[in-house]
Image: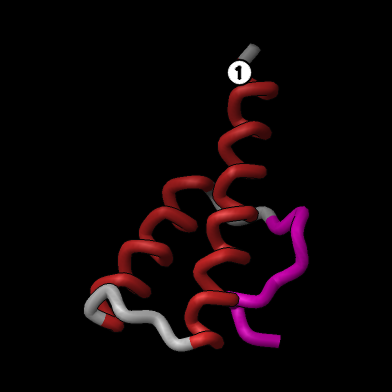
Amino acid sequence: MSPDSMPSGSVRSAAELNERIRALWLRTGGRLTDREREQYEALVVEWAEAVRGGVVEAA
C-alpha cells in the first residue's frame, strides 16, 4: 500500500498531510490525473480528520 493510500485513522499529523498535499499540487502543476485526484481527495479527508483530532485533543 502506498503512503498516499493509507486507511483513515493514520497517525500522520495535519502538518505532514498538508505538506503532502502541497507537494502533490507542485509536482503536477495543479493538473491532476484521475489517480492523482483520488490521492488528493484521500489526503484532504485524512488532513481534515487530523485537524479535528488535534482540536479535540487540545480542548
For residue 54, what is the image quadrant?
top right
Task: Report the front residue among 1 and 40.
Answer: 40
For residue 53, what is the image quadrant?
top right
Magenta stretch, overall SS: loop
**What x and y, as percent, mark residue 16?**
45, 56
Residue ID at (59%, 76%): 38
Q: Is residue 27 left or right of residue 16?
A: left
Disc 1 residue type (three-letter): Ala
Q: In this picture, which residue range is highlighted in magenta?
A: 1-10
Quarter of the N terminus within the rendering: bottom right
For residue 48, what is the image quadrant?
top right
Vertical placement of 25 versus 17: above or below? below
Which residue is tagged 1? 58
Vertical placement of 52 versus 50: above or below? above
Name the element at disc 1.
Answer: helix
Q: Is residue 37 left or right of residue 12?
A: left
